[in-house]
Image (tube, grey):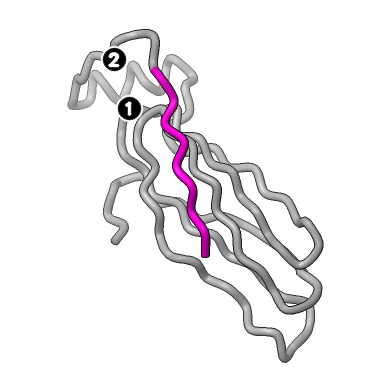
Amino acid sequence: MRARFYPVAVAAAVAVVSGPAAAAAKAASGAPEEAECHTSVQGSEGVAVCFNPDPDLDHVQLHIECLQWWDPDVDGPQVPVGPAETVTLSDRCWEEISSVWVTRLPDGSGS
């Protein structure tokens, strides 16, 4: 499993506010509350590029289901994605890929 981290500069300062008022403000703003991931298949390699627009730490995990019954499926490690950070996750099957998806743990409870 390869994970590459690409920090992104943030132009505006972010105020840290907690509690119900902060949750309501975040929901009202329409801003995503978790990392946004885009997956693709390139031959026998599955790739996910995830960006975290939220000021809170998020965790993402790549999953790949291989097409052949004898080809082991992949559940990658949970990778932290900091605020305004992009990570690229990739892994592979020996042959064809059936599906690729990403799960998230936005509460920061990932290991």
Check disc 2: other Cα within 10 Å, few if <14, some if 14-19, many if 20+.
Answer: few
- Label 1: few (<14), some or many (≥20) within 10 Å? some
Discs 1, 2 touching: Cβ within 8 Å: yes
65 vs 30: above or below: below
The residue to which callout 1 is attached is 55
Q: In this view, does 80 lie to the left or right of 40?
A: left
Number of the label disc, if any, that sits on residue 102: none
Report x, y in % for residue 89: 55, 53
Q: Which of 35 and 91 is in front in this view?
A: 91
Q: Residue 25: horizontal and vertical position, in percent?
A: 33, 16
Give above or below for 24 relative to 97: above
Closer to the camera, 102 or 20?
102
Residue 41 percent coordinates (x, y): 76, 56
Quadrant in which the C terminus appears: bottom left
Q: Where does the magenta region start and end?
A: 1-9
Check disc 2 and report the residue beneath it.
14
Is 65 left, or right, of 96 in this rendering?
left
Asked if residue 32 lies in the magenta stretch, the reply is: no
Q: Residue furthest bottom?
A: 70
Q: Taking 77 as reference, is 70 above or below it?
A: below
Residue appearing at x 81%, y 62% in the figure? 43
The residue tagged with tag 1: helix, strand or loop?
loop
Quarter of the rendering containing residue 102: bottom right
Q: Residue at x 54, y 60 (%)?
A: 62
Amino acid type of the residue that numbered disc 2 sits on in the rendered structure = Val
3D distance between C-alphas at marks 1 and 2: 7 Å
| Between discs 1 and 2, the one toward the N terminus | 2
Q: In which quarter of the image is residue 81?
A: top left
